[in-house]
């Protein structure tokens, strides 16, 4: 089952990822294009969780009817989910290897955005196959959110390096983390092992949102989104919003926002017939993300990036400010990939993982 608005929202989310990830000058960035330094939630912090929410929605749309069939081939479905999740994970690892070899920014990083996506896709897909009832899935989501809160609250302070998630990553992946200090042996991984558990909660929330979407219960979807944001906002008073820890309040706050965005997009695109802006990127989302990553590495490794930015974008800074010049590069970079994906969509090209 394919819904135009889901492809559109997915594509807009990927475009936002490119806009945030590809600043021209990392010393000058608009605050709304930066992630919160620790606690808090900026506009940029909504992007990845909304993408993860849509992963859950897509699982429901792709597998829902097959799973519900009386003679559902669960073993084959599970194998397909496992293989696809593994391919997504390995693609993320491969991109990190390319980054290490070309940018040499730091050593090899084991985890990342695609790795987390692959893990959560696999676990949520298996839960959808073997835990089919809505009640069971809501119970699993509740257990994850409350259990993660209990783990972090009982595991010491929530500060960087002192929180339980960072301590787990330091112990288990160490120098393979995004940040690692050889002098202290401390590591920090924004897509770390323990924090992947509540990220799975985001995907499970998407699984239930997808069920409402399949049933045409758009009002329920919107109400659920508003309620999730309200609960997440209240919960943040005790368990702060934090993307790097992917706190339980963050799951509900950002997931609720994503549900509202999907409900609105469905009404505008699938009901009223508005253009599905972003759909071309949405149907080739992982290809767009991976292609943008490789292009960034190529621009830096070839030495083209420096002269390009200095000659084309930096001259905008004296008149409009350095933040504008930096954002202009990111916007141009995103626009190029947008046009490439529009062309690919018109040609009927699909890159599947």
Image (cartoon, rainbow, N blue to C red):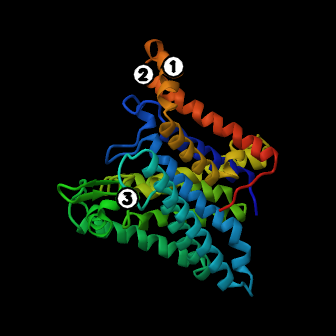
- 268 vs 8, nearest the viewer: 8
- 323 vs 51, nearest the viewer: 323
Q: As displayed, is residue 101 above or below residue 162?
A: above
Q: As displayed, is residue 13 above or below residue 232?
A: above
Q: Residues within 10 Å of mark 1 (few under 14, many from 20)?
A: few
Q: Quadrant of the N terminus?
A: bottom right
Residue position marked by numbered label 3 in the rendering = 247
Across and down, in percent, residue 309 comes to: 49, 25
Whether residue 339 is visible here, answered yes or no, is yes
In screen coordinates, is 183 left or right of 39?
A: left
Residue drawn at point x = 74 percent, y = 41 percent? 342
For the residues carrying marks 2 and 1, which lies nearer the camera in this image?
Answer: 1
Secondary structure beneath dot 2 equals helix
Secondary structure beneath dot 1 equals helix
Across and down, in percent, residue 175 comes to: 30, 60
For the residues carrying marks 1 and 3, which lies nearer the camera in this image?
Answer: 1
Q: Residue furthest right?
A: 347
Secondary structure beneath dot 3 equals loop
Q: As displayed, is residue 279 above or below residue 24?
A: below
Residue position marked by numbered label 2 in the rendering = 322
In screen coordinates, is 30 left or right of 277?
A: left
Residue position marked by numbered label 1 in the rendering = 311
Residue drawn at point x = 67 percent, y = 50 percent? 282
Q: Quadrant of the C terminus?
A: bottom right
Residue drawn at point x = 50 percent, y = 68 percent? 119
Q: Residue furthest top?
A: 319
């Amino acid at each position: 089952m394919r819904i135009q608005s889901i492809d559109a929202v997915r594509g807009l989310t990927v475009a936002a990822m490119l806009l945030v990830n590809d600043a021209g000058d990392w010393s000058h960035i608009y605050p709304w294009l930066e992630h919160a330094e620790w606690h808090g939630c900026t506009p940029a912090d909504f992007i990845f969780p909304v993408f993860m929410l849509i992963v859950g929605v897509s699982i429901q749309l792709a597998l829902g009817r097959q799973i519900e069939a009386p003679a559902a081939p669960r073993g084959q479905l599970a194998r397909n989910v496992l293989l696809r999740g593994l391919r997504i994970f390995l693609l993320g690892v491969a991109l990190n290897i390319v980054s290490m070899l070309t940018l040499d920014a730091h050593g090899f990083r084991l985890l990342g955005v695609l790795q987390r996506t692959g893990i959560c896709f696999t676990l949520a897909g298996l839960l959808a196959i073997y835990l089919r009832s809505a009640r069971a899935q809501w119970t699993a989501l509740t257990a994850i959110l409350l259990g993660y809160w209990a783990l972090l609250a009982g595991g010491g302070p929530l500060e960087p390096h002192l929180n339980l998630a960072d301590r787990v990553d330091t112990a288990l992946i160490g120098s393979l983390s995004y940040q690692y200090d050889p002098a202290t042996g401390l590591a920090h991984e924004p897509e770390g092992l323990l924090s992947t558990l509540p990220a799975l909660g985001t995907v499970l929330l998407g699984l239930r949102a997808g069920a409402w979407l399949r049933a045409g219960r758009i009002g329920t979807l919107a109400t659920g989104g508003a309620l999730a944001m309200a609960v997440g906002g209240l919960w943040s008073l005790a368990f702060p919003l934090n993307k790097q820890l992917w706190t339980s309040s963050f799951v509900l706050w950002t997931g609720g926002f994503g549900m509202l965005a999907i409900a609105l997009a469905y009404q505008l695109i699938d009901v009223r017939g508005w253009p599905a802006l972003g759909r071309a990127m949405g149907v080739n989302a992982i290809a767009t993300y991976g292609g943008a990553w490789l292009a960034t590495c190529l621009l830096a490794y070839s030495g083209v990036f420096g002269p390009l930015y200095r000659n084309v974008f930096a001259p905008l800074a004296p008149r409009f400010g350095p933040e504008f010049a930096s954002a202009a590069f990111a916007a141009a970079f995103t626009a190029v990939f947008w046009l490439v994906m529009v062309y690919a969509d018109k040609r009927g090209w699909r890159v599947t993982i």
